[in-house]
Structures are given as C-alpha cells and as structure tokens.
Amino acid sequence: MNSKNEKVVTSLVGDYAGGTPVFVHVKDDRIIRVRPIIFGEDEAKPWKIRVGDKVFSPPKRTNPAPYDISIRRRVYNPKRVKYPLKRVGFKPGGKSDTNNRGKGEFIRITWDEALDIIAEELKRIKEVYGNSAILTIASGHGSHGFINNHGNINRVLGFWGGYTPMIRNPDSWEGWYWGGEHVWGFDMAMGTPDQYDMLEDVMQNADLLIFWSYDVEQSGLIGGQDKSQWLLWLKELKKKMIFISPDCNYTASTKGDKWIPIRPGTDAAMAASIAYVWITEDTYEKKYVYTHGVGFDKWKDYVLGKEDGIPKTPQWAEGITGVKAYIIKALAKEWASKKTTLAIRFGAACRTPYSTEWARMMIYLQTMQGIGRPGVGICAIANSAPIDFGIKLPDKISARPMINRCANIVPKNPVKQCVYQTLVPKAILDPPIHWKGGRIWGPVEEQFVDFTFPMPGCSEIHMIWWDTVSNVANWNNTNKWAEAYRSPKIEFSVAQSIFLENDALFADIVLPLCTQLEREDFSYEGHPYVMGRGSDVGNFVAVYMKQCINPLYESKSDYEICRLVAERLGVEKEYTEGKTIEDWIRGLFNASCLPELISFEEFKEKGYYVFKFPDDWERNPGLRRFYETGTGLKTPSGKIEFYSERLAKYFPNDHERPPVAHFIAEGETHQESLISEKAKKYSLLMESPHPRYRFHSQHDTVTWLWEIRTHKIIKNGFAYEPLWINPRDAQARGIEYGDLVKVYNDRGAVIFAAHITERMMPGVVRVPNGANYNPIEVGKFDKGGAINTISPLNTVSKNAFGMAVNAFLVEVEKWKGEIL
C-alpha cells in the first residue's frame, strides 16, 4: 500500500485456455488500472534464438491481448448480472410456459429463493426422471483460473448421483481432428502437428511462409501478443509471406508480401491443383513420399484424373476457387523451389463443410516436399516457441474441473450417457440420435465408436445447468439451439454468468457470477506442452491470482455458487473436502514443480513466479525425427497415410470423407457451394473467422473496443457488428458504408452494418463468430450480429461431427425497416 492508498496486486486476464499475468491497481476497493507485468532484469530469463550473427529474445514482460487488457470495462459493466434472477412466468414443477425464454424477461429474487428453487427442482427432476435427465453444459470460453472454471457443477452432481454431460467437440480444429488425424495421428493435438521448436526452425531455415486460411494476429491473440513480435522478427529476417484467404486479413495487411483471395470452402481444389503442377513437372520428393508415406499412388491417380476422369489442373481449380490458373502455377513453382513452411493453426478453412479434405491435403502437400527437413513443415507461429520440459504444472486438459488435479476424491459419474455438443438441438428436439465419438483431446480410436442418446435405461433431457453460456453465439445453427432451449421438454434450467447474454437469456434462474478479479485463484500463462505444441509466450509465469476487489453487487464465484448448491443437496463436505480456497491453491502449488523453486509463502506474497529458461535445450523441431527415421507416427503404418486404411475399413461407403482426400463441392450433408441449387437464391458465400477484438463472446460488451470501426459500427446508440463486403457487391445492392443490412438464408436472418472494403474479395462477405445474441424474434431474427444463428446445423460430414460454421450461402440486402 502506498501513500495514496493504492495497492498493486497480481492476477491473470483471459480465457482459461490462454491468459496473461497482469498487475492490477486498486484504490478504495476500485480497480483503476490494469497493466502488463514488467520483470526485473534478474527476475526473468527468456529463451534465445540465434540466426546468423543475430540473437532474438522476448522482452522481460507479459503481453496481454488488447481485449484482455480492457477487463476493467468487463468488471464495471452495466450489463452484468447483479442479483439472482427468475424468468418472468417461470413456475417450479415443470408446468410453466417456456415461450418467453430467450427474450431476457426476468425479475430479481434473493439468493435463498434462487438456491431453494434450484435444489428443489434438482430433487424433483431426479425423482421423476433420474439423474440422467440433467444436462450439464460446462465447456469452453470461461474466465481464467483453476478453482473457478468449467466443470465445478459436474463435481457437485458427481457426488449426488450423476448427470448427462455435454461432450465438447474439437471446436476450431474440426478439419484437423476429423481429417488430419487419419493422415498422421497427433490426436492429443487434435490433428495439428508437433510444434516443438518450430519457430526457431522457421527463423533459421525457411525461405517462404504460406499462411493458408490463418490470421496469427486475429485468432492467435489468445494467450497474448508475443507472437506479434515474432512476426516482426520474420520480417526483419526478410522471410517472404504469402496469404491465402478470402479477406486480406490483419496479419496479411501488415506483414504480407502477397494476398491470394480464394472462395471459402474451395481450398481443397486449389491444393489438389498445386499437387498436379508438382507431379506433372516432377518437382516433388519422389522417394520421400514412398519411404515416409503409404498410398501416394492413389492420391496421384486422383490428382491426375485417373480415378474420376478429371485432371485437377490449375484451370480446373480456377473455375472453382476464383484464383487465376497462372497464380496457382506460380505459387506451386515458388513453393517447390524454396524451403517453404505452411503457417497454419486452426481457423476458417478447417471449419467448413468437408473441411477434412483441406486439412488432409495440407499434410499431403508438405509431405510431397519432404516435411520435417529444415525449413519445411507446418508451423502455427503461435505455440511454436521454445519450451522447457523441466517445468511441471497441473495441466489444463486432463481434469474438469481443474481442482480435481489436487482433490483427494474425484467423483465418478454413474450416468453413462452423454450428448455431443454439435448435436444438442437434435438430442433435445428429435431423439434418439446416433453419432461416432470425437471428444476434444480424445484418442483417434473414439472416432470409430458408436454412441446413442438416450442410452437404454436413461432419460431424455429435462433440465440444463450452464456454467458457460457461449453456445448460442458460437456453435452450429444456433437458431435451432434456441428452439431446443425453449422446448417444453426442458422443465427447468439454470445458468451462472457474469452477463445476461446468449444462453443465459434462456435460463429460468440466472445466478450472478463474479469476474476473475473479484476472487482468488491459481493459474499460469497459456498452455504448456500438453497439446503437442511448443510455447505460446516469451516468459512462462505461474500466478497466485489475488482477489483485487470484493465481488460487486451480489455476485459470487463459480466455486462458491457450487458450494451453496452442494450444501442444499447434502454433498458440501464431499465437494469442498473441508478445504479453504487457499488450501486448494496450496494443493495446486504442491502438484507442480514450484515447491522446488519457491516457498508457498513467498509465492503468495509476490503473486507470481517466472520460470527461467535453460541456456541450452535438446532441439526437436516439428517432424525432424520422423524425417530422419521415416516412422514413429501414431498411424497404423507409423507413416503419413495418403490412403487411410482405417477410413476404408470403418467407412467404406463414405463419399464425403473417402480414404484419399478429395475436393467435395457438395454432398448429401451440405449444399452450400456456388454450384448448389440454392445459390440461385443465396448468391454470396459467408466467411466467418475467429474475432480479433474479443475472444469468441468474451469482451463483446466492452464499450472501449466498440470505437474500432472494423469491430463495431455505432448507429442510434447501438453497436452493430460490421459485415465486410466488397464495393462491387455493395454497389449491386445499393448499399453504402454504414448502412444497416439484412443477411439471411433459409435458417434465419441477422442485421449488420456494412463495412465496404477492397480487403474482401467479390462474391464473399465476412462476419466473425461470437457477437452476443440479441434477438428481434427468438430463433429467427437477430440484431446482435450472431452469425452462427444461420450457419448450418449439419456437421462437417455424415461421419465427422465437428461444426461447419464457415463457407455457407447467404444473401444480403439493404435493411428497409427502422433503425433497430
């Protein structure tokens, strides 16, 4: 405490998957400033990369994402849930009208009243239907911390007889997970490749980087801005960067040497045509594809047209992709003539209908150039920095909730059924449903396992408990989710949320949740090596997250809310194990290597510990060992599989994900391409990437960020989501900059404000996912900019159950109604 009664405490901002340590300045129990931590000269020791006579090393500080540093506007935000709320018209007992769910009509009640209703409804549901009737939605995009994070509701119900969990799909990695894993494995990284030491390899050895459907400074900001500096290093080293994307994205516009616009959903056609150039011009590693791969001849037959009579020439691809044949040829020639790294993490192309085919072809192409040799690989830039394997911390993947990492007893859920996330609407509205497994971070073998809901002896869903409320803004065809949430089958629902937004609008009871700056917790910066990646940061830091201020209004932490419910259900002792919050933090501390480096008392007092990077480490960049040995991958052959024996065995008649990757314009699951019949009615393709100025839905309420015109356009006091549209398409529709426009298809409509720009290719429009749902008509018409409300409900393909929320057909017209 200084003379001005100001204190500075440590915390961590961001989503549970990323997060960055910060100093929080507090005066008179009010946060007045949030800033990065600047480390002392001897306090931090970041890694170093040497390239020639140059040495590159990160600064000794943390680098929060721009939206994370704005957290003060989340804490002090008028849209927060201040008190427990009850939906207008709700009556306990499963007999209330559900028609106003989603409209945001609530009245204030007391905590005791709310907890009594929750406990009594849980007991009633259990008595009438059994525990399997309770669906828990505890996944994705919550605030940071180990003690207060996804899944505490599962711990409570696990001690009380069980629940039906919603199983999270590999969102953002769909094409890689359902496609890439069948080429080279990497199931713990969801099909994306090994990133260890790849940044160093790229800096030292690559000549050319091709960023295919990937914007590092948009979807890569999770975990902070360190990688923005790494991109500047690449520019300093004069690495050429080419970007393939429907839009000239943020990284392309500031770092790129060339932008190649491509129609979304057609990337696999361009990839096949590049392979055609290499095969016909003999510019690929002919021995390598046989020593390190299996089934290359079947891929070659497809590319040359021997399989289907259609050679995949650049001219063929031009008509599909909109990319001129001469550009495809020039790209193929330059790619093959240089040490080329594909820069891909996740993003738009792996979230389209049939995205499995593009992801598999990316691996095929780099294999044809000898993947694993210096400078030739697939690198995310993010998650590719050096990492110290000596650091041992409780991982963020293996246990949900994360306090189970240091719990004495972890309850086992006696309910055997589950619901897959992309199938929640169908599970509620039209059971029974069937699918093949595909749990996020699950083994590839799960993709061949049959699942059914409801299972014999189990109930359908009659209650929902949310601890994260981001589905309506971020998942597939969420107008259908809205219909499911409003179904009379759902007799009771409860959400705990910081804001009255998205899924919380459909709850019968809403409980006010505090932010991470209003509670104590433990965490560390970013993901460690648990996902087959390298590091995402320059300095790896563990944090004792201090309670900066008292919880505002009547809000409480996730942990405390669950404790109060557990108390009423008679399982509080089991849930808490008699531990205080500090006891849990000490347990997580002791489960790490921190006790070897610092005492708990010193860690608590200081608030953080910076791990010092070793002077040297054993390099193992990407697939270097595979390049040297030709085996060791987690595939049946141990090699890269151009032809997947497993897909051929388990899905012999699947023409939407055949054993060899194909370009698929449309099929029985999707008709969303320009050759589809409905393109006559909906003539534009929608590109929907991850957002730059929020993390999915988080920070969408931050008014400071609304001042950025590519993020929001203010009209009549309302912040509209911008629709990027090319001047040619805007002029044809009589649209001027800032006009309100209606974007629609057969699944519904959304209002946006027009952002007219040459950075968008003609025939394609662009809206990032994650804008908060603000319905004009629930389940049909939205003005908040929630583009996922009109994305396809069907999954990637008939046997691949990820989302397909990019590259779908829409039409745009100038809004002729009143300003909403």
Image (cartoon, rainbow, N blue to C red):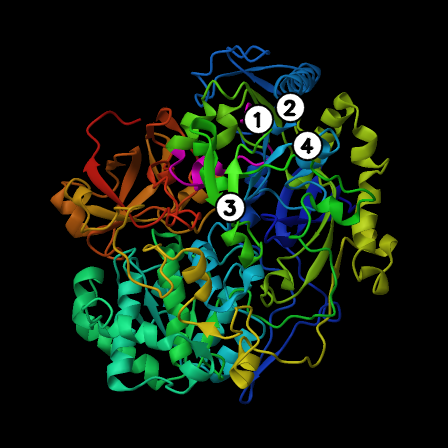
Residue numbers of the magenta segment: 460-478
Q: Image height check: is 743 above or below 645? A: above
| Figure check: 349 above or below 714 | below
Residue identified by numbered label 4: 162
Which badge, 4 or 2, comes first in the chain's sequence? 2
Amino acid type, residue under disc 1 in the picture: Ser
| Badge 2 density bin: few <14, some 14–19, many ≥20, Cα 10 Å | many
> In the displayed structure, would residue 618 be above or below residue 395?
below
- Residue 25 located left or right of residue 768: right
Q: Which x, y percent locates residue 705? A: 45, 44
Q: Mark 3 points at which residue?
A: 450
Q: Earlier in the sequence, mark 4 or mark 1?
A: 4
Q: What SS does tag 4 mark?
A: loop
Residue that carries the numbered disc 1 in the rendered image:
459
Give the quadrant of residue 107: top right
Three-letter amino acid code of the residue under disc 2: Gly
- The answer to whether residue 698 is visible is no
How far apart, in angstroms, are the residues tagged by discs 4 and 2? Answer: 9 Å
Q: Is residue 229 visible?
A: yes
Q: What residue is shown with label 2?
A: 130
Sequence-wise first label, 2 or 3: 2
Find the distance from the CA under tag 3 to the CA under tag 1.
19 Å
- Mark 3 or mark 4, which is nearer to you? 3
